[in-house]
Image (spheres, rainbow, N blue to C red):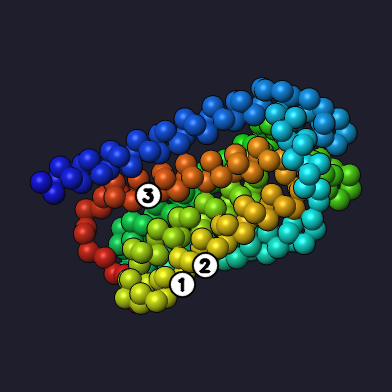
Amino acid sequence: MDFIKDFIDKNKKLSITIMLAIATFFYTILVAAIDRKPIGPQGSKVGWSHLNGSFRDAIGENVFWDKLTDVLMVLAILTALTFVAIGVFQLIQSKNIFKVDKAIWAMAGLYVLMVVVYIVFDKIIKVNMRPILEEGGKLECSYPSSHVLIICTIMGSAYVAWGKIRFFTEREMVLEIARISAIAVIALTVAGRLISGVHWFTDIFGGMLFAATLVSAYITAVPMIRFKSKERRPVR
């Protein structure tokens, strides 16, 4: 019975990940194709121009929230580095690459996918450009919001991973504080990027979709990773 329950659970997680990936794919196409007009700086064309233009006019620009989300980005990157440190510590402690926790291995794969998504939409597929010019009068890619993509992916996966690391599971209060902090950082990031006015509305939502897909993929992948040796040396 446990085998059947485990099989159903894995397939449910996989199905959710696939549905999120499909939704993200078609949403990206819709943003790139529908109501595309030159409402951006230097006449850059923007998808869903009426919705995005109305939202931009209503919100304006807020430098404080822009800077705050930059700070949250640093915090998220530091969080990612803690998982790198845990993986290195486990490797040194066990002297066996296969004894590094599978949650850490999955995290490494997640970060690679996140960087690939960022590079593809920043350098290759430029859906929308930002509603503001950066220093030097340069246009920068807006879809998906890089802050939302990176911070929500890192903090969302951290929320899950903390529950699999012995240091946190043995300290319930620390685990709860860490998870509440992750939720707070995600909420502040989404709200901050919306209020800051440095992205179009559709691009922030796109960042959320990409992040949700990546975190769901992480949750799906962790139980599927198998090593020959079942022994683990959790971080104390």
Q: Dot 1: few (<14), some (14–19), or many (≥20) neighbours within 10 Å? A: few
Which secondary structure lies at badge 2?
helix
Q: Quadrant of the C terminus?
A: bottom left
Q: Give the residue at mark 1.
A: 177
Query: Which kind of residue does numbered mark 2 sit on?
Result: Ser
Considering every residue shown, the one lying at the far left of the view is 1
Q: Dot 3: few (<14), some (14–19), or many (≥20) neighbours within 10 Å? A: many
Contact (CB < 8 A) between labels 2 and 1? yes
Going from N to C along the chain, the mark reached first, 2 or 3, is 2
- Is 194 left or right of 2, judged from the image as shown? right
**Mark sitting on residue 219:** 3
Q: Please name the residue shown 40% across and 60% down the image.
A: 161
Q: Give the residue at mark 2.
A: 181
Q: Please name the residue shown 25% across and 53% down the image.
A: 227
Q: Quadrant of residue 47?
A: top right
Give me the C-alpha separation between circle 2 and circle 3: 19 Å
Q: Please name the residue shown 39% across and 54% down the image.
A: 105
- Residue 224, how many percent across, how many down? 29, 46
Q: Nearer the viewer, mark 3 or mark 1?
A: 1
The correct choice, above or below, for 17 with respect to 235 in the image is: above
Which secondary structure lies at badge 3?
helix
Q: Nearer the viewer, residue 139 or 106?
A: 139
- Residue 177, how many percent across, how many down? 46, 72
